[in-house]
Image (cartoon, helix red, strand yellow):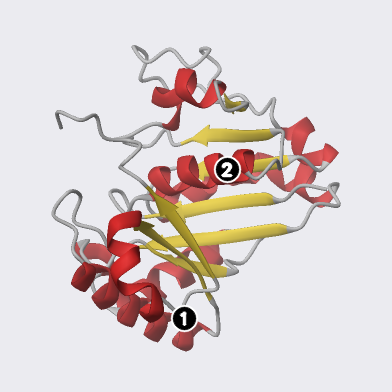
Amino acid sequence: MGRIYIICGFYGSGKTEFCVNLAVKLAESGETPVTIADLDVINPYFRSREKETLLATKGIEIMGNALENNLGQDLPAVSYAFASRIVRGENVILDLAGGEAGVKLLAPCYSAIGNSKAPVEFLCVVNRFRPETDSAEKMAGFVRRVNGMSKLGITGLVNNGHMLRETAASHILDSQEAALEAADILGLPLRYTQIRRDIYEGISDKIVSKDVLIFEKLAMRESWQ
């Protein structure tokens, strides 16, 4: 039996990066099949479908775009063909659009989720270095707004305190402190920390989330960016 992962967060929080890295981790652990449902159609900056070819080599499929993942199209044409995979209990990662408005795209999935026996994790990616979530109070406020718009409540937080290639250990730990305070306010666990391997190796004893998602380099940034 797989798991349904619903991922939300503000624009630029690293939400799509987390979805891609989580999918890779599941696939490499033999937990296949894995599907990413790309529902990020509200002012998308990075799209998981940009990595369709790379992910296919790992047995990961991108679904959700009615225009067959055409990168030249910016129309919000969403297909929910992946819903049958949710019902079958496969691993499906729903990459919601940024901000609380992104949860609206979850509405057509409620029936499939209700008919699935797969457990659900609804995770909010927070980044201390984004102005919308630069404090525990703002993080908690965002989660409450999402919960107020959704039939499903957020079940945990993801610390993704990054500054792209300038990320240092202090960024991860500062963001972790705020995320832990927000988690305490909300009564939720700090479920994941997303962190680059070379940074993690220096502070592994200070990371307190239940799980750690380690990556080698940014998946959603090309080497020249």
Secondary structure of residue under mark 2: strand
Give how far across and how far down residue 152 sits, in percent. 65, 61
Secondary structure of residue under mark 1: helix
**In the image, is 71 to the left or to the right of 144?**
left
Crowding at mark 1 (Cα within 10 Å: few <14, some 14-19, many 20+): many
Give how far across and how far down residue 208 sits, in percent. 45, 79
Give how far across and how far down residue 58 sits, in percent. 57, 28
Say above or below: 131 vs 85: below
Nearer to me, 20 or 215:
215
Nearer to me, 153 or 19:
19
Q: Quadrant of residue 130?
A: bottom left
Quick check: can you spot residue 96?
no
The residue shown at (63%, 45%) is 107
Q: Identify which amino acid the numbered label 1 is placed on.
A: Ala
Say above or below: 217 vs 52: below
- The residue labelled by disc 2 is 94
